[in-house]
Image (cartoon, helix red, strand yellow):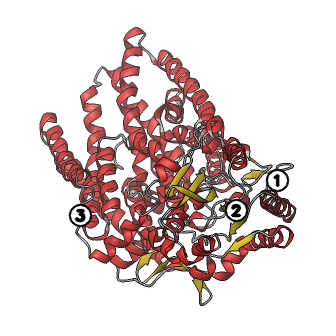
Amino acid sequence: MTDHTRPTFRADINGLRAWAVLAVIFYHFGLPGFPGGFVGVDVFFVISGFLMTGLVVKGLERDTFSLMGFYMARGRRIVPALAVLCAVLLMLGWWILLPPDYKMLGSHTAYALAFLSNVEFWQEAGYFDGASHEKWLLHTWSLSVEWQFYLILPLVLMAVWRIKPGRKAQTWAISLGLAVSLAASVWVTVSNPSAAFYLLHTRAWEMLGGGLVYLLATKPMLTGTQRRWLESAGLLLIVLAFTIFNKDSSWPGWRAGLPVAAAMLVLLANRNSPWTASALPQWLGDRSYSLYLWHWPLYVALVYMSLDDNPWAIAVALLLTALLGHLSYVWVENTSRRWLEKPRMSVAAGGLALAVVAVVAPAAAIWKSQGIAGRFAPGIELAAAEAKNYNPRRDECHPSKGLNFPSCLYGGSQLAVVVAGDSHADALVPALVHAINRREFGVMEWTYSACTFVFGSKKEPTAQAFLGGDNYKCSEFIASAKSRLNDLPNTIPIILINRYAAAALGANENNTGTNIPVLIFSREFAIATPQYLTEFAEHITQTACQLAKQRTVYMVRPIPEMGFDIPKTLSRRMIFGLNNDLSISIESYWERNAWVWAAQDAARDQCGIKILDPTAYLCHDGRCWGSTNGLPLYTDDDHLGKAGNKLLEPMFAQVFNAL
């Protein structure tokens, strides 16, 4: 509970919390005008550093500082509301989360209450990645960073105080730590962006910036005018940071210096103004922690129900954020602090530990039992399980890095056809195998992850780095495949299957196409201009024609990309009784792939290559379907699974009937 009657209470800090939490909430819910609202977390870090440094230094100066008392105060502040949130999510998860999602929630709950979730999320995916939007406790990464900072800060300041008492030595120690952490942040943001975002050593400088303000703020005597200008400049810079940065900005690195410096200016001003000290900022600031805790699971719920772009659903979620944040503040935060301040420290600590164990124990059981299958109707769990119904030899035959290019033979021992391409080719091999019309015929797979089988191309440097840097060997794979083809009889046809649109326009997962090319030919293009698509199309045609000089070439029309995960979306909708099949419009398919069809048509007309069209089997009534009769055709958003492969068997039968 915030005590507004204590002399040390600063309304401006409480109001600054309101600015920070609103920015984060509005950013996550996608409200216009807040593309960089995630920097609100950086503002929170500065505030935390200021307050924690003040508590430790004042205690050392008065010779009253208690390390265990400091830790216990932080536990009273953070643990109860977090534990209640986790417990509520685990209970609701029993009814609405499928086994894979429930297992993940169990794991994340344990990491969140151990304050190690930042490390776990760093190892899983980037903060801005689409997959992270389905993690119910993703936002607890910042609590873990703060808790780790709380553990270390007093130990460092106590050690410095023993060597040389006084604020001067503390100021030098914090300044040194700030400089080292800032340098690490700038360096790691370039070399390992996900680690830089999540980990303490690249975030500590933001909290140390707040600590530096505390140590220096008592020295300058600022006039009222100076304070007003400092506050105005700080708040304007915070607003600027909210608007000029976005999810594509490398973060934190040097860019985070803007919101950090802005928050430091507001703290230095130490001024109560209508912008921070009026009723609304104070109400929000009091509840900022609980608002932060509850807003993210509500956003994930919208994602879970495919309502994250529905204005009415977003409005309801914002109202629920305010309501649940208020109830958590009144019933959990305030109540738990009153209860935990009364008994002896050992008793209070035992109560907190018991609460954590009471939540972590079932969370661990959920994780260990693989999310507890059998809680939903068989059709729902069957739909969710299609996510794993991919090519059973994928791990063996479809490398994503390195120079090991396996030649995997499926079916009989007599090689009848070679299939080459990227992951879409690997996904369709089962359809080819089941289409074999003679037992002795076999299919050879040559595929490499995200490697478009087009001669004369290379990966754009950023894409190359993302895929594995120097260990990503797409060009070498294509060269190896060309060499191996020369050793095969000319009677062996080749089938080319690629996700050309993703290579040219960027992936469209979660319906967020970038229009940024992944492949380079004659030169780099910032966006996929008509000139770039023409050049790409020419290379598609030339590749097919070059191969057609020696053997029959089949080209598969692009597989429709749904843009959203079919098994997840369908099974989740079925839980809520929304079991209609999923699809995209044929217009959206053409928008991404018309240029590919033109390139393939040119290869057919110029070189006699043969075309196989999966849309004849996957698209009808003006739609391309991701599921039929409640069964997903895909394992994710763009790779066909077992049911989708089954539909394409007649298409591939044409190949074997022609042999």
| Quarter of the image that includes the C terminus | bottom right
What is the C-alpha distance between the residues marked 2 and 1?
Answer: 16 Å
Residue closer to the observer: 1 or 445: 445
Reply above or below: 174 against 99.
above
Instruction: Give the image location of residue 285, x and y in percent.
Output: 43, 55
Task: State the SS at label 1.
Answer: loop
In the picture provided, is 77 more to the left or to the right than 564? left
CA separation in Å, label 1 and label 3:
50 Å
Toward which corner of the image does residue 618 lie, by quadrant?
Answer: bottom right
For image coordinates 83% across by 70% down, the residue present is 602
Mark 2 vs mark 1, foreground winner is 2
Mark nearer the N terminus (2 vs 3): 3
- Label at residue 162: none
- Residue 500's label in the rendered image is 2
Residue 356 in the image, given as x and y percentages of width and height: 21, 46
Query: What residue lies at 18% left-to-right and 45% top-to-bottom?
Result: 357
| Mark 3 residue crowding within 10 angstroms, few (<14) / some (14–19) / many (20+) | few
**Tag 3: amino acid:** Met
Viewer-proximal residue, 553 or 390?
553
Contact, CB < 8 Å: mark 2 with mark 3? no
Q: Which residue is mark 1?
A: 525
The kind of residue on which mark 1 rests is Phe
In space, the residues marked 2 and 3 are separated at their CA atoms by 44 Å
Instruction: Please report the residue visible at 53 percent of the width from the left and 18 percent of the height from the top.
Output: 172
**What percent of the width, then of the height, locates residue 115?**
34, 41
Residue farthest bottom in this picture: 621
